[in-house]
Structures are given as structure tokens and as C-alpha cells.
């Protein structure tokens, strides 16, 4: 997908949740073009530098668990910069939504929640052994897409660490509903609350406030397990797997370069 066509993708996604009207759509168009220009000039070079650092660590054999955790943190920071950049202008549009648009928005979000809940219940209906088997398959597939076919030793590493992940589906869904309920309560006040925009921006830029302690702890644990798993896979990679991984990273760097043009 061409970078210059991202506006089409954004509108395609947005239409699932809300239909903007007249001046709202014109304002969103202007904001979107500004966001894309900002992203192109300010962020793409960061992504390239990040990918280049990963490539260098792979080539020099320095991609250990600590380095990987650092990359996961950096990846989150990439998203947080985008979120913080766009949230004030999104909120300025949010203040103009009418009651019908607000109802439609939160109904669509709850529809997503219910679909996620149904999928989670389907997963829980399976035996623990089956869930672990499927988790192993997903991890193996994700890794093999980047380095090629896994060795028996690498499959054993995956099997060892797959059982150490803590399920977070229920906590994640609770978090989604909690933050959405907080936003819904704010929207009720949008016509008379002089602090509406400030409070909604704070909500959007500080989502972790709505995560339970157990969700945060489990997520941190799972991130550490992920980093250790990948670092152990890294130490067992063949020359062919290493070359495949480097080629994939080069392709990502090339994609970022093309986006910058």
C-alpha cells in the first residue's frame, strides 16, 4: 500500500465507527494531511534508524534479551508519539459530534468488545493442552515468517517458553471497557464542560491509567518472556536464517525509504 494512499485507509477504518458530517469531514481532511506530513518528515527517519540499529545488533551478535526489551519499549514509544500528536486535533472534532454520532461510536466499540469476548470464550472452551498447542503454532509461524524453517532445537525453545506466557485476554477486555466507559461519561458533558477537551486528551494520552495492576504486571512478564525467547532463538540461528532475517529487515528499511519519497 502506497504511503500517499494512507488517507483512504484511514477513512475506510473510520467508517466502521463514525460518519463525519460536513465541516467535521473538512476539518478531519485538513488534520489528516497535516498528520501525514508530520509523520513523513518527523517519524520515518526514526523508524529507519531503529531498524538499522536492530540490523547492526544482529550482524554483531549483540541482540540479547536486554536489547530486545529495549526495542519493544522503543516500538511503543513510536506509537505514543503518533498518539500524542494527533489526539488534540481529534478531540477538537470530538467536541462537535452530535448525539447520534456519539451513540453510533460507542455502539460500534461495544460490538467489537462483544466479538472479542466471544472469541475469548471460544478459546477458553478448549482444553489447556489445546490452547498451548495453538499458542506454540502461532509463535512458530510468526518466527518462521522472519527467519525461515525452524530447527528442532528452536521448536523446543518455543515450546519451553510458550507455557510461561500469562493469558491477558480478560484483563485486556476489561481495560477496553473501562476506558471506553470513562470516555462515554466525558462525552455526555461535552456541551457544557469547559474542561472537556483537556480531560479527553488526558484520557487518550494516559491509557495505562485504566489498566489494572495485574494486567500491567502480566504484560510486563509476557514482554520479558518474549524477549528471552527471541534472544535464545537468535543464538541458535543458522547462517541461512540470519541472512533471511537481515534480508527481511533490509526490505523494511527500503519500504520506509520509499515512503519518504
Image: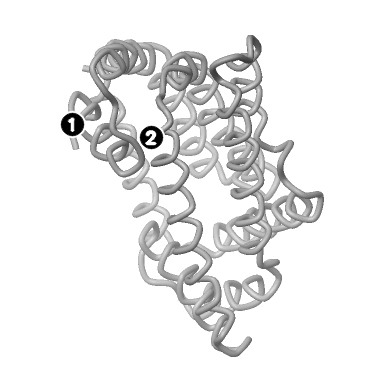
Residue 30 tag number = none
Residue 195 location (% of width, % of height): 65, 12
**Quadrant placement of the N terminus:** top left
**Considering the numbered disc 1 on the image, is that residue within a helix, a strand or a loop?**
loop
- Residue 27 falls in image quadrant: top left
Which residue: 43% across, 56% down?
111
| Residue 143 as seen in the image, left or right of residue 170 | left
- Relative height, residue 84 to residue 242 (above, below): above
Pick the residue in front: 190 or 162: 190
Pick the residue in front: 50 or 5: 5
- Residue 73 falls in image quadrant: top right
Which residue: 48% across, 18% down?
95
Residue 219 location (% of width, % of height): 69, 53
| Residue 192 as seen in the image, left or right of residue 3 | right
Per the model, the C-alpha gap separating discs 2 and 1 is 34 Å
Residue 168 location (% of width, % of height): 66, 62
Q: Mark 2 vs mark 1: give the one in front.
A: 2
For label 1, the residue is: 2
| Residue 39 as seen in the image, left or right of residue 134 | left
Residue 207 location (% of width, % of height): 65, 35
- Residue 258 falls in image quadrant: top left
- Relative height, residue 45 to residue 34 (above, below): below
Tell me if mark 2 has few (under 14), some (14-19) or many (20+) residues whose alpha carbon lies within 10 angstroms of its own.
few
The colour style of the image is: one colour
**Quadrant placement of the C terminus:** top left
For label 2, the residue is: 100
**Considering the numbered disc 2 on the image, is that residue within a helix, a strand or a loop?**
helix
Amino acid at each position: 500500500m502506497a504511503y500517499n494512499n494512507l488517507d483512504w485507509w484511514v477513512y475506510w477504518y473510520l467508517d466502521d465507527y463514525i460518519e463525519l458530517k460536513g465541516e467535521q469531514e473538512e476539518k478531519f481532511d485538513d488534520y489528516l494531511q497535516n498528520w501525514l506530513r508530520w509523520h513523513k518528515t518527523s517519524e520515518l527517519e526514526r523508524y529507519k534508524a531503529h531498524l538499522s540499529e536492530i540490523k547492526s545488533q544482529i550482524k554483531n551478535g549483540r541482540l540479547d534479551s536486554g536489547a530486545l526489551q529495549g526495542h519493544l519499549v522503543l516500538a511503543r514509544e513510536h506509537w505514543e508519539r503518533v498518539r500524542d500528536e494527533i489526539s488534540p486535533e481529534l478531540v477538537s472534532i470530538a467536541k462537535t459530534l452530535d448525539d447520534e454520532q456519539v451513540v453510533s461510536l460507542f455502539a460500534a466499540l461495544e460490538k467489537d468488545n462483544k466479538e472479542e469476548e466471544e472469541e475469548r470464550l471460544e478459546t477458553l472452551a478448549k482444553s489447556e493442552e489445546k490452547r498451548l498447542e495453538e499458542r506454540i503454532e502461532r509463535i512458530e509461524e510468526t518466527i518462521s515468517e522472519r527467519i525461515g524453517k525452524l530447527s528442532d532445537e528452536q521448536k523446543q525453545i518455543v515450546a519451553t517458553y510458550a507455557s510461561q506466557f500469562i493469558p491477558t485476554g480478560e484483563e485486556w477486555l476489561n481495560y477496553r471497557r473501562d476506558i471506553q466507559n470513562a470516555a462515554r461519561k466525558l462525552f455526555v458533558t461535552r456541551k457544557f464542560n469547559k474542561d472537556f477537551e483537556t480531560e479527553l486528551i488526558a484520557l487518550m494520552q494516559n491509557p495505562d491509567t485504566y489498566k489494572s495492576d495485574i494486567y500491567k504486571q502480566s504484560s510486563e512478564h509476557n514482554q520479558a518472556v518474549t524477549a528471552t525467547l527471541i534472544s535464545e532463538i537468535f543464538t541458535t540461528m543458522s547462517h541461512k536464517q540470519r541472512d533471511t532475517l537481515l534480508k527481511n529487515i533490509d526490505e523494511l528499511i527500503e519500504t520506509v525509504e520509499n515512503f519518504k519519497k
